[in-house]
Every structure is written in structure tokens, then in C-alpha cells.
Amino acid sequence: MTIDSTLIDTPTGPLAVLAGPDGAVRAAGFTPEPESLLPLVHPGLRGPLRHRADLGAVTVAVRSYLAGDLTAIDAVPVEQHTGGVFMAHAWQVLRDVKPGEPVTYTGFAGLAGRPAAIRAAAAACARNAAALFVPCHRVLRTDGSLGGYRWGLEVKRWLLAHEGRLTGS
């Protein structure tokens, strides 16, 4: 099964997106090398990459998001798998965190139904393969600081500022 890939220009650099035959995003990240995302895709969902200039609805959603329609990415289907029920549930919960309304890792654990599982919530962010579409950038440390982000704190800072959470910090 072939996986379609594309690069979309953003103010923080290229966003690489990998999508399955049905258009569901399997991985996304702020890198100029789509092939570097393939190890993030569950082995059962991997395949050879085919570069495309445009991924249709996915590309339209990202461009709309960048143009200010912050909910445009919400309707894009995502397909990523793990060995655990909590991880899949946590990723779905992340998709419900609204732009401009970030949560803390503690708050995220609570929203996922396991308030004491703060480390598991942080692990869900760290193992998320579909950056932007599963918005782990919307999770902050308890003190409000950025915490970590696979694609760099400058990217996380820009995304949060774009969504109205940060102003120039």
C-alpha cells in the first residue's frame, strides 16, 4: 500500500504530511524530509512513499488553518495505532482541545479520564505521529511554560501564537 506524501510551506518551515489511500493522515511533522516521518508510522500502516504536490482536502485544511481558520484541521481524519487503548483515547482527546485554549499535562490527563496518569499523558504527546492534526502543541507544563515538542520550541511557540495563546514570547 502506497503512502502519499507532500510538503506544505508554513511560516515555521515545511510541514511534511503522510496520508494513506483513504486520505487519513498517518504522520505529519515540521521537516523538509517526508521520509523521516515513516519510522513514526505504525509498521502495519507503512508503505512506499509517493510524493504528490497536493493531498486534496488535507492540503486545503492546512492552508485554511494557516490563513486563520483554526478549526479547519479538525475534520481531517487521522490514522495512527499503538498497543494501548489509553494512547488512542488520549490522541482523540487532544483533537478536542480547542485552539487558543491549551491545557496542562495534568489537565490533559484528567480530560483523558486518568487524572493521575500525567506521565502517560506526556507519553501520548511524545508518541504522537500526526503533529498539528493531533495538536499536542496545545499541552503545556503546569507552570504555563512550553515544555517539549518534537519539532522544536520555536515551532510550538509559533503555533500557540498563531492560535492566539502567546503574544511574541
Image (spheres, rainbow, N blue to C red):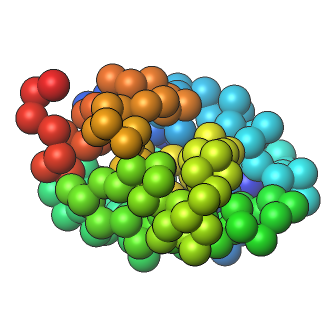
Residue at image point 82% right, 64% down: 84
Q: In this view, does 11 lie to the left or right of 152?
A: left
Between 59 and 82, the residue placed more toward the observer is 82
**Residue 56 seen anywhere in this rendered image of the structure:** no
Residue at image point 10% right, 27% down: 168
Residue most extreme to the front: 116
Tell me the quadrant of the picture where the C terminus can be found. top left
**Residue 143 seen anywhere in this rendered image of the structure:** yes
Residue at image point 62% right, 41% down: 126
**Residue 37 picture quarter:** top right
Q: Is residue 98 left or right of residue 78?
A: left
Q: Where is residue 142 in the image (x, y as percent from the top left)?
A: 37, 42
Q: Position of residue 72 (x, y in %)?
A: 31, 68
Residue 46 vs 149, above or below: the answer is: below
Q: Where is residue 150 in the image (x, y as percent from the top left)?
A: 55, 31
Between 166 and 37, the residue placed more toward the observer is 166
